[in-house]
Amino acid sequence: AEKILQIRNLTTAFLTDQGVAKATDRVTFDLEKGQTLCVVGESGSGKSVTALSVMRLIDYAGGVIMDGEVLFNGEDLVRTSQDDMLRIRGNLITMIFQDPMSALNPVFTVGDQIAEVLRIHRRMKKKAAWQRSVEMLKLVGIPDPEIRAKQFPYEMSGGMCQRVVIAMALACNPELLIADEPTTALDVTVQAQILELLLQLKKELGMSMLLITHDMGVAAEVADRIAVMYAGIVVEEGTVQQIFENSRHPYTIGLLQSIPGMDGKRGGELYTIKGSIPPISKVPSGCRFHPRCPHVMDICRTEEPLLKSSLTGHKTACWLEDKGEFDLKSNKGNNQ
Ligand code: SF4
Ligand code: MG
């Protein structure tokens, strides 16, 4: 299948009090055209840094891409000129964030804000841009779009505002939508509606989607493939079935066991992964997960396991893979 995005060894660093620290380290994954890839992990795992690096917006966050490639339709965005990036960003690739209010300008009507995007990126005339913005509001499921277009963000609910943000992001018909925790700030019932909307629009418009979430439940709903990140690296990557039904990495297994109802024991005691994710300036030696891993071995403390692919394309970075047959149905028991 055709790949819209190929991320290769993406390494992004920040200057911290302890010196230069890598927020992502050799991050590698592919997104096929028309598919959804979810990047999952706890906060601080490098998910958002990966997304901002793809958009070449990481400099605004104080980071710098040190190494690697981000191939978008074969063009390496890391080495693309700022001018070309202006052509790509907001046009071919758009991004939405967690908090819709911060993406909207409080002093303009939502119709004007969508129209503005079309006037800048598509050079549409005022009237045509307004008409298209009303159409976009209709497309994202906002009732009475002609009336709503004349309203200000504060006159709308959070869910409604996120629909407006989605309308703005999709107005130019992008090939790739990057959504960073798009439902995290919303009520649970609204979350489901927004995910549903994103999936439906992705299909209708033929887009590809890179969705970032800390929530395995969200990934289960929308992903074709999942990349699990931990402390700046991809520790496991595979199809949604491979990750949910045959997860290999102890971190992924821990994440899955900490979701209510995921191990079939709804209401039972939930597993929590002991400890917390290390700061980027203090990444542990060897396997970065070793201080928290219930299966830690001697080699894990000194040697870093690299991401290796099985014949089915299921990738895992864990020394247990080298031990051949093993059964990791559960982390429980080893942890207490
Ligand atoms: Fe655990 Fe070792 Fe695998 Fe790391 S490499 S996840 S410490 S078993
Ligand atoms: Mg984030």
Image (tube, rainbow, N blue to C red):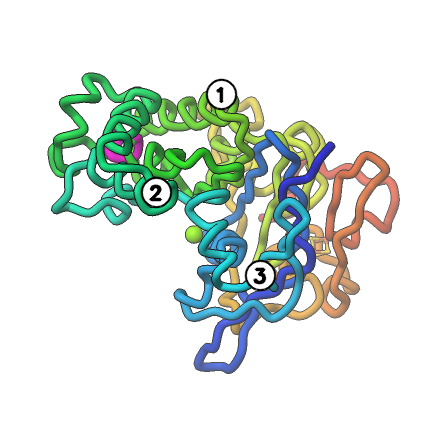
Q: CA distance from mark 2 to mark 3?
A: 23 Å
Q: Would residue 214 be visible to someone looking at this image?
A: no
Q: Tell me: 211 left or right of 100.
A: right
Magenta span of residues: 159-163
What type is the residue that disc 2 sits on?
Answer: Arg
Q: Nearer the viewer, residue 211 or 254?
A: 211
What amino acid is at disc 3?
Answer: Thr
Question: N-terminal of the two: label 1 or label 3?
Answer: 3
Q: Which residue is tagged 1?
A: 204
Q: CA distance from mark 1 to mark 2?
A: 24 Å
- Pointer 1 local density, CA inside 10 Å: few below 14, some 14–19, many at least 20: few
User: Is 160 one of the magenta-colored residues?
Assistant: yes
The three-letter amino acid code for the residue at tag 1 is Glu
Q: Identify which residue is drawn at 58% across, 54% down.
A: 230
Q: Total of numbered circles in the picture?
A: 3
Magenta stretch: dominant SS? helix
In this view, which residue lies farthest toward the right?
Answer: 324
Nearer-N-terminus badge (1/2) = 2
Mark 3, residue position = 80
